[in-house]
Amino acid sequence: MNRKTAVRRVGLVLLVANVLLALAKAAVWSATGSLALGSEAVNSFADTAYSFVVLAGLYLTTQPPDFEHPHGHERIEPFVSLFVAVGVFAAGAGVLYTATQAALRGGTTTPVNSPLAVGVLVAAGAVKLLLYRYCRRVGERRESPALVATALDNRNDTLTAAAAIVGVVGSAAGYPILDPLAAGVVSLGILYTGYEIVRDNVAYLVGAAPPPELREDILTRALEHPQVRGAHDVVAHYVGPEVDVSLHIEVEGDLSLFEAHDIESSVVQRIRDIPAVDDVFVHVDPKELGEWKEDDDARVAAAESEPDSEGGSADAADDGQ
């Protein structure tokens, strides 16, 4: 299954699941009068609304490249994720406000002790937990920040369902203060999740550097070519959720232009095979020119750094390196 089909399918599954959960909660709320379940129903209707936005965003991001967007539309995804973050912050603030008001009144006043209300909350929490794992797995595998953000939001919904269960059961058991206390703790977790989503997606938008492991993989792949003597000036940064790479490689100066072109094309393809990488730009330097720059992302090939028979370094490592 390609990326477009995979992420669109997740968006559709999310929408259908949220619609069904909202209808189920609303029906039981109407039958039982449980205030905790009523707040969960409102939460699910809000989830349904943003699911439409996420599905539309995923549809746009999976459109093929066109004249105005030659690199594709994946860069829209961080904006979709930030929209999810706004919803997460709003939900967290709303839960915190409601919990504070209820605590000041001495606790919630849930009027029923309904096994049906507890049952639908347990089922909703289980469904949200499954959606969290599903979205997280596909989001990480397909490099989709919007799906990862949605996964975290579903994790929050699992926690709010648990808090609602505490409220229903605690109130019925004669401890109404348990509901606002549990909701207050959950609200802090929700707000932290919003912070996580913003932190990760702002990095995509401002062109932050990828993790050190990916930069190391880039260097390793460049030096795997037998005619590459060294690599330096590696610049890797996020452009949307994907990574653009530029680097210099050092080769023997007496190679023909055709040979240098073949080396450059081979190195580009090796680095493009990294799933997170989009574009790669390779500048070919004759190693004899002495353009070597020693920095954290500079390395000579293993054969170039081995000592010669007299105990010195190999010639290629000395020529401009």
Image (cartoon, helix red, strand yellow):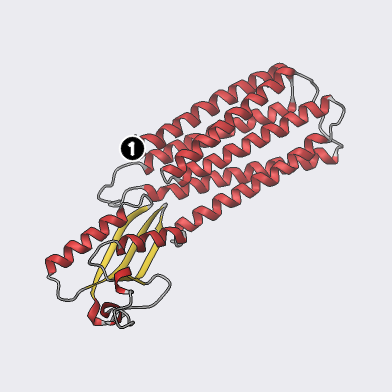
Above or below, 279 against 178 in this view is below
Please state which amino acid type lies under the numbered disc 1: Asn
Is 252 or 24 nearer to us in this picture?
252
Residue 206 visible somewhere in the drawing: no
Is 222 or 311 nearer to us in this picture?
311
Q: Quadrant of the N terminus?
A: top left
- The location of residue 249, given as percent across then percent down, is 28, 69
Q: Circle 1 is placed at which residue position?
A: 2
> Residue reaching furthest front?
309
In which quadrant of the rendered view does residue 108 lie? top right
Q: Residue at x 53, y 33 (%)?
A: 131
In the figure, is residue 112 to the left or right of 53? right
Residue 25 visible somewhere in the drawing: yes
In the figure, is residue 199 to the left or right of 241? right
Q: Residue at x 66, y 36 (%)?
A: 159
Above or below, 108 against 261 in this view is above
- The location of residue 78, given as percent across then percent down, is 46, 50
- The location of residue 218, given as percent across then percent down, is 36, 60
In the figure, is residue 311 to the left or right of 196? left
Is 222 or 59 nearer to us in this picture?
222
Looking at the rendered structure, the secondary structure element under dot 1 is: loop
- The location of residue 232, given as percent across then percent down, is 34, 72
Above or below, 142 against 198 in this view is above
Above or below, 193 against 108 in this view is below
Residue neighbourhood size for the residue with mark 1, other residues' Cα within 10 Å, grouped as few (<14), some (14–19), many (≥20): few
Q: Residue at x 42, y 37 (%)?
A: 56
Is 145 or 234 nearer to us in this picture?
234
